[in-house]
Amino acid sequence: MAARRPKSVSTRAFLPSKQWTGRAGVFFMICASLALFAMNKAENPAIIKLRTSVADAVVPVLGVLASPVEAVRSAEAWVAEMATLREENIRLKNENIQLAKWQAVAREMETENTALRNMLHVVPQQKYSYITARVVTDLSGPFAHAALLNGGNAQGIRQDQAVMTADGLIGRVVEAGERSARVLLLTDINSRVPVMTEVSREKSILVGAGHDMPSLSYLGAASQIAVGERVVTSGDGGIFPPGIPVGVVVSVDGAVKVKPLVNPSKVTFVSAIDYTF
């Protein structure tokens, strides 16, 4: 009699433990969700207490399950940030290269400028110092135009110093006491200032006329001065430093008239220039 073969046991009857664990987790989450949904509708105190207990038990599990998602989001943000930093780093490197080139150009120009100055024996422009004082009174009359300052020798103000504001020249010191000084304005009939026009580069003397429009004297017959030209100090004579704005040419018919840039009647503070020729 032939021996009976044992019945084969189907491999499908048993699943690997990992699959059972995964399915059990999913089943647990579904059951917990349904239980929370069902208990959410109940208002019984016992149900409310049970619902709270279930929520307390489920929330940590949901937090663990959500951790991989948050980790992925953080990783994506990190990758995006690293890409931005890389682009910024490349841009800064390019800017650094450009700045290095300009620095080299600047050094070359500085060296060349120094060499040219040494060759031409250029005298550096002198730096001036300024003494600021207040205009305490206007001494102007029908012909004499002057102002009195509340500073004198004690503050460093002395005779023949040029006096100006931020807008331009106003006059020169003609008398200086210990704590006061008298300024002769450009419009006084005794005022004489060596000047030069900026465009035509013609030198002349600005002469006060007793009113608000002094004129230019000692001009050549072929003068090319035009209306609108600015007039500045020429520096001739060694009293006024060169280049101080004085006024603007307003008329060339007959006498060349100049309108001063500074209106003395509206001035409160002035500066005397400590200038040595």
Image (tube, rainbow, N blue to C red):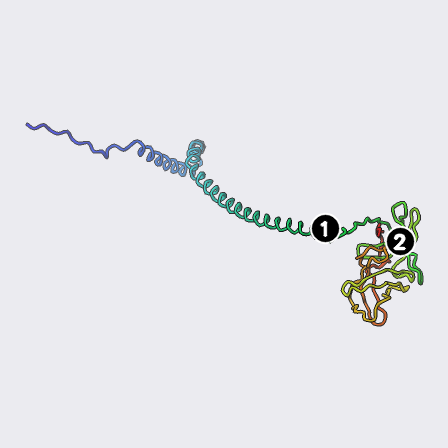
Residue at the spot 77% in from the left edge and 62% down from the top edge: 198
Q: In this rendering, is residue 40 above or below 202?
A: above
Lateral position of residue 227 relative to residue 207, left or right: left
Q: Secondary structure at mark 2?
A: loop
Which residue position holds label 1?
118
Lateral position of residue 147 relative to residue 99, left or right: right
Which of the two discs, 1 and 2, sits closer to the camera?
Answer: 1
* Rendering coords of residue 71 (x, y %): 44, 38
Quadrant location of the N terminus in the rendered image: top left
Residue at the spot 34% in from the left edge and 35% down from the top edge: 22
Q: Label 2 amino acid? A: Asp
Residue at the spot 49% in from the left edge and 43% down from the top edge: 82
- Circle 2 packing at 10 Å, graded few (<14), some (14-19), many (20+), is many
Residue at the spot 67% in from the left edge and 51% down from the top edge: 112
Q: Label 1 amino acid? A: Asn
The answer to whether residue 41 is visible is: no
- Pick whichever of labels 1 and 2 is earlier in the sequence: 1
In-front residue for pair 155/28: 155
In-front residue for pair 228/241: 241
Task: Give the mark count.
Answer: 2
* Rendering coords of residue 163 (x, y %): 85, 54
Which residue position holds label 2?
160
Lateral position of residue 87 relative to residue 24, left or right: right
Q: Secondary structure at mark 1?
A: helix
Distance from Cα at disc 1 to Cα at disc 2: 34 Å
